[in-house]
Image (tube, rainbow, N blue to C red):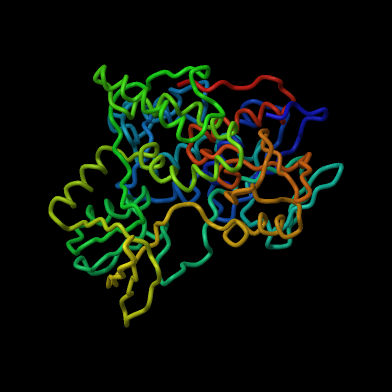
Amino acid sequence: MDGTFAHPARHALIIGGGASGALMATHLLHRAPEIRVTIVEKRGIVGCGIAYATDNPEHLLNTRVHNMSAFPDDPGHFLRWLRTRDEDCGATEQCFVSRATYGRYLESLVAPWRDDRLRCVSGEVLRIEETDKGVSAHLDDGTVVLADTAILATGHAVPAAPRDGLRGAWDFTPPEDLDAQVVIVGTGLSMVDHVVALLARGHRGPITCLSRRGLLPQPHVNGAAQPIGRAEVPLGASVSALLRWLRGHVRAAEAQGLPWQLVLDGLRPHVAAIWRSWDTGTRARFLRHGASRWEVHRHRMPPQSARAIEAARETGQLTLLRARLTGAVPIGAQTGIVTARSDGTERMLIADHAINCRGIRRNPETDSAPVIRNMLARGLARLDPLRLGLDTTPGARVIARGGVASRRIFAIGPCARGALWEITAIPDIRLQCADLACALSGHAGIVKQRS
């Protein structure tokens, strides 16, 4: 973090009430009794966001229960919550629960503070102003909210409307016909969610999933993360040198009968430090050549989902196609998905139901929340050099077009990926929120994450 403040905040405004916003509010309310919090969320429901708003029981967390506590210094908190509620269902540290259950957990974290130190406002922030005395947020209904600081927690950049004639990744409306031909563009975790939901519903028709490399997320395995000390990690090394070092660790683990997944789990606490140690050119090379393979090994699917995917592939119902999308054309009630393979050959897939699951890298200038688009247009914020999201300092301060860091506006979670790269999962976001809560409250202590 960038240090504490000479005049700690007394009223913090959080823009966005999804997972990032709920976690930020939770840490402020727990760690800073002098701070009041206002959350502005357009959906009116705090804690769910797009990831946890689903009510489909087939949509599971892709992280085990023991890594999903809201508090990095209390890893058992989520499990204890599960065991005191109807969501228990024999929950253990190693199990994977539904995302809907986790959404209820996030909502429960802030519920006790409502009508006390927490105010939740239903609406969308369109513009924010910063002065020497504080910030003012202008909402879509004309309301103005005043606060000492503002924290942008708007989540992933998501297009307002589907493009290319394809449904959006978060649209889980199934085809009415169980024999419909389904085409999914993208083979990551969003695709997995759609496929397992279709299969659980009894879908009989063919499902074709395509991506440039045709890679599937790897499955989770049981076991504890293999500890890796910070001093062992070759910070600042090239991408190829880092991967050679990592493969060496994997070979050593496998020689002891341990799966590679446990090595990657041990590296997790150091990923942000690795990213910060690279210059822009090295980061760009990683994104071009290594990110796809990293993501399918690092962001894995629950064993239950892996079994369903494998069974569908064995029967031939699910097909993986290594190709890229070049276009989509309407053909009556159907959609023609035009693809190109690496050898240049083109093919058209006919889909009754087509879904775009091409991942979370979007154009923040066009797909971000209105307040972020407005800040970018006015120069109050800028994108990081690789255009992953808002450019911020290590302490989450938003950096303006001229390079000056804001004194009162911060950005956390997926909307500000550039500074930390992997700040899209709960174990990483919770640590960022805990650190920022300490800084905003004037506390010098920084929370340490437990493996």
Q: For residue 61, what is the image quadrant?
A: top left
**In the rendering, at what x and y percent does residue 250 appear?**
34, 25
Q: Total of numbered circles in the picture?
A: 0
The front one of 321 and 361 is 321
Rendered position, 13 above or below 427: below
Q: Is residue 359 left or right of residue 394?
A: left
Left or right of 287 on screen, residue 141: right
Q: Quadrant of the N terminus?
A: top right
In the picture as drawn, the residue positioned furthest to the left comes out as: 315
Do we see residue 351 in this rendering?
no
The picture places residue 11, in percent across and down from the top left corner, at 74, 38
Q: Residue at x 76, y 34 (%)?
A: 10
Instruction: Judge by depth and name the residue closer to the eye, 245 or 369.
Output: 245
Q: Residue furthest right?
A: 132
Residue 240 shows in this picture:
yes
In this view of the protein, which residue sits in the foreground, 439 or 316? Answer: 316
Residue drawn at (67%, 41%), measured in percent from left and top?
392
Residue 18 coordinates in the image, percent (x, y): 54, 46
State the residue at coordinates (45%, 42%): 103
Q: Looking at the image, is 248 positioned above or below residue 147?
A: above
Where is residue 249? Give x, y as percent. 37, 22
Left or right, 260 with respect to 70, comes to left
